[in-house]
Amino acid sequence: MSPEEHISPIGHSLLNRRSFMKNSGFSLGALGLAQLLSKDGLLAASDPTSFTGKSPIRPKIDPDNPYASRDPHFNPPAKQVLVIFCPGAVSHVDTFDYKPDLTKYHGQKPPGIPAVTFEGPSGNIAKPFWNFKPRGKSGKMVSDLVPHLGEMADEFCFLHALHTQTSAHPQGENFLNTGFTMEGFPSFGAWVTYALGSENEELPAFVAINDPRGLARSGKNNFGNGFLPAAFQGTDFSAKSPPANLQRPGSYSAADDKSTINLLAQLNGKHLERYPGDANLAARIASYELAGKMQTSIPDVMDISNEPKSIKKLYGVETGTDLKKEYAKNCILARRLIEKGVRVVQLFNGSDPSGGNGITNWDSHSNIDKTHAMQAEIMDQPTAGLIQDLKNRGLLDDTLVVWCTEFGRMPFLQGNGTGRDHNPDAFTCFLAGAGVKKGYSFGESDNFGFKSISGKSTVYDFNATILHLMGLDHERLSFYHNGLERRLTNVHGHVIKQVLA
């Protein structure tokens, strides 16, 4: 049998030049028609990149002014957001998720507990290492590990049935902050500033305040721009480490500085005219111009020496360990940035890209009674002081506060008997301020805090809710990248309406 006889009739038609030209013509005509219909908005309902039936919303950004304030999708309760992120996984069963059965079954190993978890064999059920007490008018049970935050329980909206996709710290941080376990995706702060810009022209739209001990496990990916234009990455500095190279050399006068800036503006403008539409070039120029403005704005916002003693006492700046004092200064810096209109402030409590086992972050695989206590001593009073200060100044009316960690910890000890392993199936975060219920708890984990059972919410839901409170529809806020309409929530997520005020 000849090779031609092996080819089917359909195969022959594909090899026929007349058929090939005819099919190509029909295909190209169909593509042209689709393009014309798309321009007229007649394909929106069947757009394959908009499976929700909603057309994507990509903000119109002026390349010459990428930080300009932009309108939200709808009228929002919150204009700014403060994210307090605790890397390492805070134990929910030792802080905000009260489980009496842990005390009842202390030292036992009830059925259903896995023999092996993330870091090895599991041990027995362990009661909370700190006593729980009812707090405020709501009577919310909060442990003595975080007494200052406990005093403010009536301001908080707790989510007790969160769960995540991973039990590894780098992936967990990525997932919480970018919506993906892999690297290379835009952070939450980048998405918000991409959508809304900023109302302050002299400070970055998105500031990441790193822990005094350094970067968190996933480093700058937690506040990176991913595939969004470079203008929307977070600018990271802290009370201890101001932005580099902002000081003018002593031999360089203010007049010299101004003339140089004017010359650079002219040269950059001409260069941009040669390459119109180059978003990366425009972002670089905008970042240099912002850096020039920051030479005067940053020293002012970072100078906390004039803060009254009452504020320093509220935050705990002058008591406790050196790490607590430095973190307290970071908290004051966060408030000052919110006051100045910075759109997104991300405050880190915990660090160390290589781990730390509870010493540099909340990852307490051993000696949890000592390591969690050390982290809480740093975090509790300054964080509570920050939220209280925002409330006293009326800033909570327009600011959403998000306290979060990447996952929880197990209700039983590890095989070594002194720490709790990672728990991706149940953990607690809380919201406060603009648009959320006060003194309210949503969702429930089981009797041991092991798995979410009621009001189960994903990290996608969590991020969708935060975007909603900022006036953004998570199903429509998108960026076209590699043939896909990318979103912070990927193709998932629902707004948790039960927590909305």
Image (cartoon, rainbow, N blue to C red):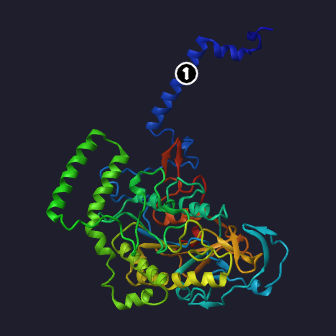
Q: Position of residue 448 (x, y in %)?
A: 75, 78
Kindly tell me whether residue 299 is visible in this rendering.
Answer: yes
Apparent side of residue 21 relative to residue 450 in the rendered image (left or right)? left
In the image, taking residue 245 as reference, residue 36 lies left or right, namely right
Left or right of 38, for residue 281: left
Where residue 399 appears, as percent x and y from the top left, is: 43, 73
Name the residue tied to disc 1: 26
Q: Label 1 crowding class (10 Å Cα cut-off): few <14, some 14-19, many 20+?
A: few
Relative to 407, residue 331 above or below: below
- The kind of residue on which mark 1 rests is Phe
Residue at the image position 52 percent from the left and 46 percent from the top = 485
Which element type, helix, strand or loop, lies under badge 1?
A: helix
Image-quadrant location for residue 425: bottom right
Quadrant assignment, res 307? bottom left
Q: Which image quadrant: the N terminus?
A: top right
Measuring from the top left, give residue 300's x and y in whole percent.
28, 74
Residue at the limit of the structure toward the top, as seen here: 2
Residue at the location (61% across, 14% down)? 19
Q: Image quarter for residue 75?
A: bottom left
Left or right: residue 151 versus residue 421 is: left
Q: Nearer the viewer, residue 388 or 77?
A: 388
* Residue at the farthest front position: 251
Above or below, comparing residue 171 to residue 275 in the picture:
below
Q: Residue furthest right?
A: 111
Q: Residue drawn at (53%, 77%), measured in percent from left and top?
A: 437
